[in-house]
């Protein structure tokens, strides 16, 4: 009994250390995120960056949606997986093979199309919003010019 506890100090240092590091990581992430959001990625810096920093700014502020490309690649991977894995059923159940081959790919396609439709709606709404802001701004400018002429 003494041999088992010779180097034990009554606590599990790896579990405690991991928990402490997770708490420190959370605090640092919150502080760092808030500082970066208000300094680097704030509205004041919207058109100041070029190159990689512009890409990073657009990425962090969700100006450019990456999900559409990711969904397209993911759909191809899942469609290939469903097709290939359906061949595992060919020896046990031909109907199961056809069902998985046809219905599996159909359900995957419908799911991904629905996701892409939602993204398209989001993109179109954002585009309409930006055009409306530009139109309202132009209307205000015309009204001010008309007032100045009178």
Image: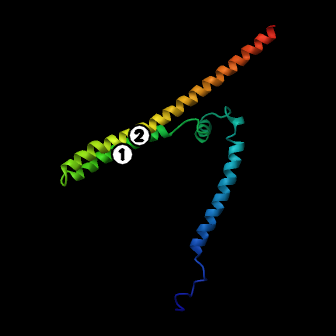
Q: Earlier in the sequence, mark 1 or mark 2?
A: 1
Q: Residues within 10 Å of mark 1 (few under 14, many from 20)?
A: some
For the point 57% across and 30% down, which residue is it? 126
The mark lying in front, picked from 1 and 2, is 2
Q: Residues within 10 Å of mark 2 (few under 14, many from 20)?
A: some
Percent coordinates x, y for residue 101 in the rendering? 26, 44
Q: As drawn, which residue projects farthest toward the top? A: 150
For the point 19% across and 55% down, which residue is it? 92
Residue under circle 2?
112
- The relative height of residue 136 versus residue 18 in the rendered view (above or below) is above
| The C terminus - image quarter | top right
The part of the image, by quadrant, that contains residue 55 is: top right
For the point 60% across and 67% down, which residue is it? 19
| Image position of 24 (left or right of 2) | right
Q: As drawn, which residue projects farthest toward the bottom? A: 2
For the point 65% across and 20% down, which residue is it? 135
- The relative height of residue 14 versus residue 132 in the rendered view (above or below) is below
Quick one: 42 or 117, which is closer to the camera? 117
Residue under circle 1?
78
Q: Of helix, strand and loop, which one carries label 1?
A: helix
Find residue 14 and name its label. Answer: none
Q: Are marks 1 and 2 in contact (CB under 8 Å)?
A: yes
């Amino acid at each position: 009994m003494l041999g088992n506890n010779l180097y034990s100090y009554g606590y599990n240092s790896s579990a405690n250390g991991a928990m402490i590091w997770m708490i420190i990581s959370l605090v640092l992430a919150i502080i760092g995120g808030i500082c970066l959001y208000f300094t680097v990625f704030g509205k004041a810096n919207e058109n100041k960056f070029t190159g990689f920093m512009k890409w990073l700014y657009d990425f962090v502020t969700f100006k450019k949606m990456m999900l559409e490309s990711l969904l397209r690649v993911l759909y191809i991977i899942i469609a290939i997986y469903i097709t290939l894995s359906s061949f595992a059923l060919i020896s046990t159940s031909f109907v199961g093979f056809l069902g998985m081959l046809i219905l599996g790919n159909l359900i995957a396609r419908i799911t991904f199309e629905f996701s892409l439709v939602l993204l398209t709606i989001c993109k179109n709404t954002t585009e309409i919003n930006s055009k409306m802001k530009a139109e309202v701004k132009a209307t205000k400018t015309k009204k001010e010019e008309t007032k100045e002429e009178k």
